[in-house]
Structure formats: structure tokens, C-alpha cells
Amino acid sequence: MTSTAVPTAASSRSTVAQTVHDIGLITKRNLIRNIRVPELILFATIQPVMFLFLFNFVFGGSIGQSLGDAFGGKYVNYLLPGMLVQTALFSSIGTAVGLTEDLANGVIDRFRSLPIARSAVLAGRTIADMVRTIAVIILLIGTGFLLGFEAPGGFFGVVLAVLLCGLFGFAMAWIMALVGLIVKSPEVANSAGFLPMFPLMFASTIFVPPETLPSWLEGFASNQPISILSDTVRALVIGDEFTAQNGRSLGALVGYSFFWIAAILLVFVPLAVRKYRRTVA
Amino acid sequence: MTTTPIVSAENVFKYFGDVHALDGVSLEFESGIIYGLLGPNGAGKTTLIRVLTTLLRADSGKAFVAGIDVHADPSGARRRMGLAGQSAAVDGFLTGYENLQMIGQLYGLSKIDARSRADEVLERMSLTEASGRQVKTYSGGMQRRLDLAASMVGRPEVLFLDEPTTGIDPGSRIEIWGLITDLVDQGTTILMTTQYLEEADQLANRIGVIDSGKLIAEGTSADLKDQLGGSIVEIKVTAADLDATLVALRETFDGTPDYDSGRNVISIPAANGPADLMAAARTLESLGVMPTALEIHKPTLDDVFLAITGPQGGES
């Protein structure tokens, strides 16, 4: 005698609908934590705000005047767009840390024992983290206005810049998801995540225009993805005056940005999902 | 008519580098029972659970849950089983209710069905009152109960419980034992691992003893004890009577009585059961010695476990 299946759950849902449904549930679960522990967003905002103040007041005087007309002599106009990209970058480390915590306390095992889409746990994590990143970025822009930030590109440009940074953070989160699944410990995830970011961050156009860098670094610094993203954000919030100065059109910059975002996702989504399937807590 | 086993493992091997976590384990059992997997830390209990629950792929061998090959159709198998691991795998920032509702929905229940199922399971785990609180405010025992509740949300035919009472206080342990027994009464089949002989003895209809990745003994608790031979008669007498008693008993029982000075007990292997108890009593009576204790018992699972695994297997 064989026992017959007792349909405990609707098993006829289409794969795509089920995947979207499962991702939605896990995203919601991860977002609830951000709402119930507002300190998470508060401290994630304080750090870039502190950077913004420090850099603006320490370097603003010497850098501000040499930036060209596009920035009206104000360093904050140059710095803030870069800081938005940096925030998206740092924020992605939270993905690695969050995943390792879930691994450590068995939540991932529970999810893996459920009949859910295999990508749902990672997608639910990276999407929720993107929402958190966008919240932090909006708070940072608000602070920027207090420091005299101007956005000649207008409201629409700012909105597009926020979305672009969110999307870039989302792509970076998949890299960090892979890092988290490899290192497995929250502490290691935190330091391993930060490590490659510092050289990328300083050898970029986030803080200073690339012309001021030594020539061997300038080529790398103007073309690496973080610089492309920073310049695209500048093109969106500052407008034509920046693109004229930068030499690349808004269209080209947006194109390069999407190229990098797509490239990161194409490589790291499959790697992370594959690693997730094989990961043993 | 043969009954298809609800869980079966056939010659399952799993190596982690040089560590033979599972070294050819085969076992099967039919539905409606509690199967207790007993063994020390590192014996392979958790690895076997992880293979059966699709979390880990065996290097070789086959595993079936509810007739489904867990490697060939993991999602099919997942619909039929529930898992409660060694730690409480619940989200501390969600309420107990939200945790269960989410899991119900992940099983594909509608929002409304998931809500009523959450209520039902919370009620059964006596967590209704705490259901609106964030789980991080729960005691350890409550978190384990919620974890158990989470494993039941999908109405699994087979529940895998990995050391369900490790690290919780004795009161909560007895409560969880009651819940496990209730589940089986309602038709769920359970495979649980434990390091506690007492727990396997109390709950499991069948016990598998696992050590160094091998299933080294299997049977009911009584079967395993029988492997150690028959019963044991134990006698305690006052120190003044000890020497004379020991001499007389050794005469009656052909030299087999042993004196354990640590426990201050004379023990006699009693292959003839009660007849040997009576013989011991008569010997004492003829000596005029009144024992401070006189009892006959089957070997405990501790005796069995130590006898099978040897001293090196019993460490934890």
C-alpha cells in the first residue's frame, strides 16, 4: 500500500507566479526588521552624513574653487552625487551580513526545507536591502540640501539618480550575497566586504575629479564602474553643464552605467544562486 | 500486504573531506511512529537529517520520504515534510504569528488559510497568548515551541526534529515531549535525533543507534536492552552484612554476583528473571540479612549504549 499525496498546498501555481509570490514574502520579512529596528537605517545614514560633513568642510575649501563652472564653486555639489554611489556601495555589505546571520541561526535551513523558489531567499534579501539603501540615500540628499547642495538637473533628475543608485546597490548586493555565502560568519562578512571597497572608492571620481590624480591612476579612475556611476549621477542632478565639462553625454553615461549593472547581475546572480543551493550552514 | 516505508535511506554515504559523516547508513520505518536516532555529538545524526530533508546531497545512496526520492524531486519531498533544526530558526523581529503566517504562505496557502493555520498551530503549542509579541522577547523554550510550530504549518506527513530538547530547561522538555506524542497520535510520523537515552526511551517506538556515521544497532528500546542479556538483580545491604552476604550469594549464583563499591550495590545477572530474584531473597532470609534495597530491572539504555559504542563513543 502506498500512501497517497495529501495536497497540503496549492501545487499548481505557475513557476513565475510562485517565484514572485515567494520573493515578495521574504522581501517583506526582511523589510519589517528595518521598520522595527529603526536604528539600522539611522546608523546607516549617520555614517555617510558624517563623511559628507567631514569631506565637505575639510576639503571643500581647497577643492571647491577648482571644480569648474558646473559646480558653482561648491564642493558639496560635486561630493554629494559621489557620496550617493558610495552609500549604495557600503550599504550592500549589509546583504552579506544579513545572510550570514540567517545562515548562523538556521533560518536559511528552514527556508531551504520549504517548497519555495530557489532564488527567493537571495532575491528577497537583495530587494529589501535595495529599499533600505534608497531610504538612506534619500536621507543623505536631504542633509545635502542643508549643506547648500543645489540640483540644477531638477527634481526629476534627482529622482532618477536615486533610482540608479538603488539599482547599482542592488547589483552590488548580489556580489555581497556571494561573499556572505562563502565566508558564512557575520564578522568576517563585514570586514571582507569592506576590504575591496576602499581602493575602489578612493581611486574613483567620488571625492575628486580624476584630472588631479597621477596619470597612471587617472585612466582607471575615470572609467571604473564606481566613477561611471558617480558621473552619471552628476549628469542627472547637475545637468548639461556637467556633461559638457565631463566630455561624455548623459546618454553615454547612462548606457555605461547600465552596462556595468547588467554585467554585475549577469555574472553574480547565477554564481550566488548556485552557491546558495550548495551552501551548508 | 506490505507497507511502503514512509522514510527510507539506502546505503547513504556522505564524506566531508576525510570525515566519514555517513558511512553507509540504511534504515527505514513505516508511518505513524516516532523513530529515535540516538548517538553522541558528531555521530552523523544531523548529517542524516540534512540528507533526508534535501538540505544536503549524499555522495551516494538513496533516500526516500513519503515514497519520493529526495534527490530526484526535492520540492516534491519538501511538500510532505517539516523540519525543526537544532536552533530555533524563527525571526526574532517578527511576531510569533507573523512567522507562522509567512511560512504558511510560503507553503502556498492563501493569506486567509495561512492565518487560520497559524492560529491553529499556535493554539496547539500554547503560544496563542504570546503570538502578537516579537519572538526575541520569548524564552528559549517558547522559541523552540514556535520553531516546532513552524515545522508543522505545512501539515507534514513526516516531521524531522533535530535534537528538539537540547539546551532547554527540564519543564519545557517535558512539555515538548507531550507535544511530540500528541502529533504522533494525530497521525504524523516523526524522526527525531537525541543525545538523551532517556528521551529515546520515553518517546521512540523504534531506536536506531548511530556512531561514527554507522547505524550500529536498531530496534525497540526493549530489543536493545535484550541485546545486553536478561535482567539484573541489585541488592543493597548495610556495611556490616556485606561480606557475609556476598559470600552466600556467590555460592547460590555460581560466583557471578559483583560488588560495585562506587554505588554500594551487589549486582547479579538474572537470566532467569524473577526466579533469580526469589533465589536471592531466600539466600538473604536464610542468612537473616534484611537488605536496604532489593530490586530487579532490565538494563537501561545507558547500559546498552555504553555496551555497543564502547567507552570512546560515549563522550560528548
Image: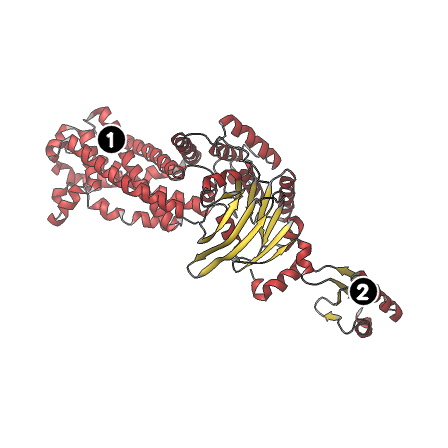
Q: Quadrant of the C terminus of chain B?
A: bottom right
Is residue B9 depicted above or below A208 in this figure? below
Foreground pick, B140 / B271 = B271
Q: Can you give x and y, in whole percent of width and height, for residue B36 in the image?
A: 60, 50
Foreground pick, A30 / A65 = A30
Circles 2 and 1, Cβ within 8 Å, touching? The answer is no
Residue A143, picture quadrant? top left
Q: Which residue is mark 2?
A: B276
Check disc 2 and give the amino acid type: Asp
Q: Which callout, 2 or 1, points to the residue nearer the camera?
A: 2
Residue B245, picture quadrant? bottom right
Does A15 sit left or right of B210 as displayed? left
Q: Are marks 2 and 1 on the same chain?
A: no
Rendered image: mark on residue B111: none
Measured in 3D between alpha carbons, the distance from the residue under mark 2 to the one under mark 1, in whole angstroms, is 90 Å
Q: Can you give x and y, in whole percent of width and height, for residue A2 in the image?
A: 57, 40
